[in-house]
C-alpha cells in the first residue's frame, strides 16, 4: 500500500484483468441499454451543444418504424399498380425498375433505411440553426402516408 492510501497495481493484476473482458457486446446489452438507458438529458450546462444521447423519445421509434413500413407498402403498391398499367413518374425509380424488381426494392428500402438511421441519430441536431432534424422524420412519415393513400385510391379504382 502506498503512503496516500492507494494500492499498487502489479503486472499480474493487469494480466488477470485482461483475461476477463466484461464489455462483451450481446443482444442482452442492447435490450438492457434500451430499457435502462441512463443519459436522457445533458449532464452539465455547457453540454447543451452535445446532440448525442443514449435515449430517444418513443415518438422517434414510432416515426422510424412507421416510415419504414410505409416505404415497404409503397414499394409493394407501386409494383402492383405497374402491373395494372400505371407508369412510374419518378425517373430515378423507373431506372431502378428497369434493372429488375429485386434491385428496385432492395435499393429503395436500403436508401430509406439508411436515411432513417441518420435522421434518428441526428434527431436533436438543428438544421440551419432553426429546425430539429427529427422534424424531417415527421415530414417523411407524413409524405409516405399521403403517398400510400394515393396509391390505395388508385389501386381500388383500377380493380
Image (tube, rainbow, N blue to C red):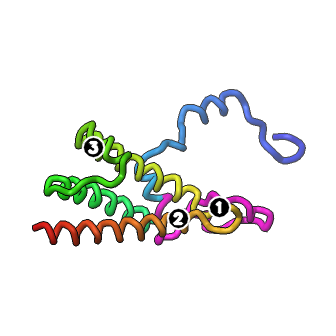
Is residue 11 toward the left or the right of residue 73 in the image? right
The disc label shown at residue 98, or none:
none
Q: Which residue is mark 2?
A: 136
Range of residues picked out in magenta: 33-60
Residue at point 66% right, 33% down? Answer: 13
Cα distance, mark 1 to mark 3? 33 Å
In this picture, is 10 found above or below 68?
above
In the displayed orientation, state which residue is furthest to the right.
3
The disc label shown at residue 97, or none:
3
Q: Secondary structure at mark 1?
A: strand
Quarter-wise, where is residue 104 in the image?
Answer: top left
Cα distance, mark 2 to mark 3? 27 Å
* Quarter of the rendering occupied by the N terminus: top right
Residue 32's x, y, as percent? 47, 59
First reached walking from the N terminus: tag 2 or tag 1:
1
Q: Evaluate if marks 2 and 1 touch, with contact meaning CB atoms under 8 Å apart.
A: yes
Q: Nearer the viewer, residue 71 or 62?
A: 71
Q: Which residue is mark 1?
A: 127
In the displayed orientation, state which residue is furthest to the left.
159
Amino acid at each position: 500500500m502506498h503512503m496516500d492510501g492507494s494500492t499498487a497495481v502489479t503486472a499480474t493484476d493487469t494480466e488477470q484483468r485482461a483475461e476477463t473482458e466484461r464489455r462483451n457486446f450481446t443482444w442482452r446489452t442492447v435490450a438492457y441499454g434500451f430499457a435502462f438507458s441512463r443519459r436522457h438529458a445533458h449532464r452539465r450546462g455547457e453540454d447543451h451543444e452535445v446532440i448525442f444521447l443514449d435515449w430517444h423519445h418513443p415518438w422517434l421509434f414510432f416515426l422510424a418504424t412507421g416510415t419504414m413500413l410505409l416505404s415497404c407498402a409503397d414499394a409493394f403498391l407501386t409494383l402492383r399498380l405497374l402491373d395494372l398499367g400505371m407508369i412510374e413518374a419518378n425517373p430515378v425509380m423507373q431506372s431502378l425498375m428497369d434493372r429488375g424488381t429485386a434491385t428496385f426494392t432492395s435499393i429503395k428500402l436500403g436508401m430509406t433505411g439508411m436515411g432513417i438511421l441518420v435522421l434518428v441519430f441526428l434527431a436533436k441536431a438543428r438544421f440551419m440553426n432553426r429546425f430539429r432534424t427529427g422534424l424531417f422524420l415527421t415530414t417523411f412519415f407524413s409524405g409516405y402516408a399521403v403517398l400510400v393513400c394515393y396509391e390505395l385510391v388508385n389501386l381500388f379504382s383500377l380493380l
